[in-house]
Amino acid sequence: MPFNVLKSALLVFSQKNESIDPKHKILLDGKVMLPNNSVKYLGVIVDNQLNWSEHVKKLYNRLSRAIGILSKLRYNLPLNTLRMVYHSIFNSLLLYACQVWGVNSQTIKTKIQSLQDRAIRKITFSKSDCNVDKLYKDLKLLKFTDIVYVQNCIFMNRVENNQLPDCFQDKFKHRRNIHNYNTRASKKGQIEIPTVSTHKYGTLSTTFQCISDWNKFIKAFSHLNVKSLHTNEIRKLLLSSIVTKY
């Protein structure tokens, strides 16, 4: 497969505080390519330590600009219209690839949640010390961490229904296909949680988080055949169950 030199980049992954050997370079069509600290791929900035700091930094600025727009529009638009604009210019940014960059650090989660709280307060003309949980509940909006949870469940539903490429399907195995004995978890169709040795690249990985959230979803709605639910049905089901607990 031919490579476009102008659209290619070299990224060497490393641990924190680990220097990259300058000898790591490649020659592509006569052009020497040196390692980059980060590369933008399909709208996501991937850094060489996989901590997503560069992506979150750019996202933070975009979300802040969206809050500025909402702050001006709130004087001229009714709340129901503002809610639609919020979904369009703010929530859409939160959704994009949040399963990848949104699970890696509690600092990132707190930072993004703070911005989301500001956006909600702006469109409702609420004070900074108001009960923000009530605002989410009244507007029927999910908080950032719950958005990631819903996206993980939708993703796993597609895995269960063989709607994703094989490279994803092979990562998930049912417990009933691993153990020779029946357990309550295997009967419910839960996925086997992989054994991991690290926190950052193990328990905080997208694969681990998706499996954990899916098993949690199955357990919470054991009276339903969750595999047969469509995407919109899962979204509505989780929205109503989560928001009422705020």
Image (spheres, rainbow, N blue to C red):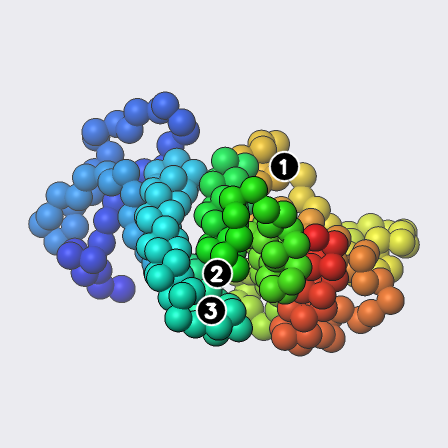
Q: State the CA–CA distance, disc 2 to disc 3.
A: 7 Å
Q: Residue at x 50, y 35 (%)?
A: 107
Residue to which mark 2 is pinned: 123
Total marks placed: 3
Which of the two residues, 218 or 34, is positioned nearer the viewer here?
218
Q: Viewer-proximal residue, 15 or 30?
A: 15
Q: Check disc 2 and report its element: helix, strand or loop.
A: helix
Query: Which label lies toward us, 1 or 3?
Result: 3
The 10 Å Cα crowd at callout 2, few under 14, some 14 to 19, many 20 or more, is many
- Badge number at residue 196: 1
Determine whether 39 is above or below 14 in the image.
Answer: below
Q: Quadrant of the N terminus?
A: bottom left
User: Please, what secondary structure does the residue beneath circle 3 have?
Assistant: helix
Label 1 sits on what residue type? Val
Q: Is residue 52 above or below residue 85?
A: above
Q: Are marks 2 and 3 in contact (CB under 8 Å)?
A: yes
Residue 150 image position (x, y, % from top left) = 62, 60
Q: Amino acid at mark 3?
A: Leu
Mark 3 packing: few (<14 Cα in 10 Å), some, or many (20+)? Answer: many
Q: Residue at x 35, y 24 (%)?
A: 18
Q: CA distance from mark 1 to mark 2?
A: 42 Å
2 or 42: nearer the viewer? 42
Q: Which residue is mark 3?
A: 82
Q: Residue at x 80, y 57 (%)?
A: 220
Q: Earlier in the sequence, mark 1 or mark 3?
A: 3
Please, what is the three-letter code of the amino acid marked with disc 2?
Answer: Ile
Instruction: Find residue 49 and report its image quarter.
Output: top left
Pointer 2 or 3: first along the chain: 3
* Residue 129 % position (x, y): 56, 42
In this rendering, does residue 209 appear at all? no
Circle 1 residues within 10 Å: few <14, some 14–19, many ≥20: few
Q: Nearer the viewer, mark 1 or mark 2?
A: 2
